[in-house]
Amino acid sequence: MATNTTATLSAEMIQYLEKTFLERSEARTIHAEGAKKKTLEKNSGTTVTFTKRSPFAPATTPLVEGENPQDDEIKSNKVTATLKGYGKWTKVSSMLYNTSIDREMKETVEMMGQNSGETIDALVRNVLHQGATVQFANKKTALSAITDDDILTVAEVRKAVRTLKKNNAMVYSDGYFLGKVGPDTAYNITGDTAWVDAQKYTGRPELYKGELGRLHKVRFIEASSNQMEESSTKTVYSNFIHGQEAFGVVDLAGSGLKKIIIKMPDKGDTSNPLNQFMTVGWKAEAFASAVLDPKWIINVKTSAKD
């Protein structure tokens, strides 16, 4: 395991240096927005079960006078998710700690915080990508068939909304579904005349993090990048449109989703006998995400173009 030292970070050790760091670019972590959140009590195992009752079929057969109809059984669906831990850490030499412009490792701590947020966002995005119902743009039937002209359009949004409605997906409390796009596909959809920018909303509703605007009963928020995959000829982008309780995220009670952990040299630490380094890291003690109903989240797979 490499330790960060004044040699490896010599750029911070020159004789004169403006004592501020350049602004870091942070990813817009939006994929957990709109999730059903659940907390698992401690000492309850690592598996979380989401349970949903299946609706009864309509009772369209008339009753027979003097007789009871056939009773119907209750049915339910279960989705399980397994909690797992995630984290990252780095060593900082005592010399670097005492001589770097990064006083008390504040910049390092902020970098770890940024990494933890981006990691959780990527984990949720991957779950959505793996579990959603796929809609290929322009009625294509395979990833390899996507071309330059198969971009995210109003027609694709309307089609996804129609599918969600037919599947009885629930809108959020504001009456809208939620859409998640990246800059490449947002560029194509926001230029349409039917698009309404978030800055032009009436009534001043509370905005989602990264909210761009709305279109055909979908409020869109923008990530730093789309989920991407390669076909034989083209980069294909995933655009998620979903209803309430389409997916869930879980953490462990009392642990907090993410923690920054700073370990200073300790007298009893025999692995660091000369107090030569400290460590800075983050840890998500236990986290899980799962698609709860694939029919309630649509992955519109498209190309993108200028």
Image: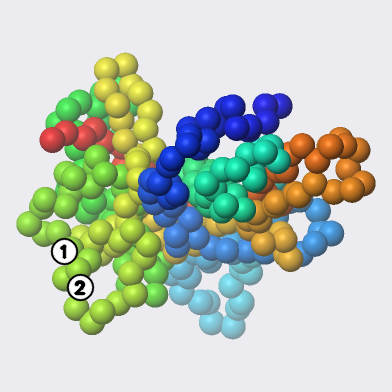
Give the structural element (helix, strand or loop) at label 2.
loop
Q: Is residue 92 above or below residue 114?
A: above
Neighbourhood count class around disc 1 (C-alpha, 10 Å): few under 14, some 14–19, many 20 upward: some
Q: Which mark is residue 196?
A: 1
x and y, in percent, of residue 14 in the image: 48, 34
Q: Residue at x 57, y 52 (%)?
A: 103
User: Can see residue 46?
Assistant: yes
Name the outermost residue toward the left: 193
Pick the front one: 70 or 106? 106
Q: Is residue 154 above or below residue 1?
A: below
Dot 1 and dot 2 residues touching (CB under 8 Å): yes
Pick the front one: 32 or 23? 23
Q: Residue at x 33, y 21 (%)?
A: 231
Snapshot quadrant of residue 234: top left
Q: Is residue 45 above or below residue 226?
A: below
Question: Distance from label 1 to label 2 (Cα)?
Answer: 7 Å
Q: Is residue 17 left or right of residue 8?
A: left
The amino acid on which the numbered mark 1 sits, given as a three-letter code, is: Val
Q: Which mark is residue 201?
A: 2
Q: Is residue 6 left or right of residue 209?
A: right
Q: Is residue 53 left or right of residue 212?
A: right
Q: Is residue 155 left or right of residue 235?
A: left
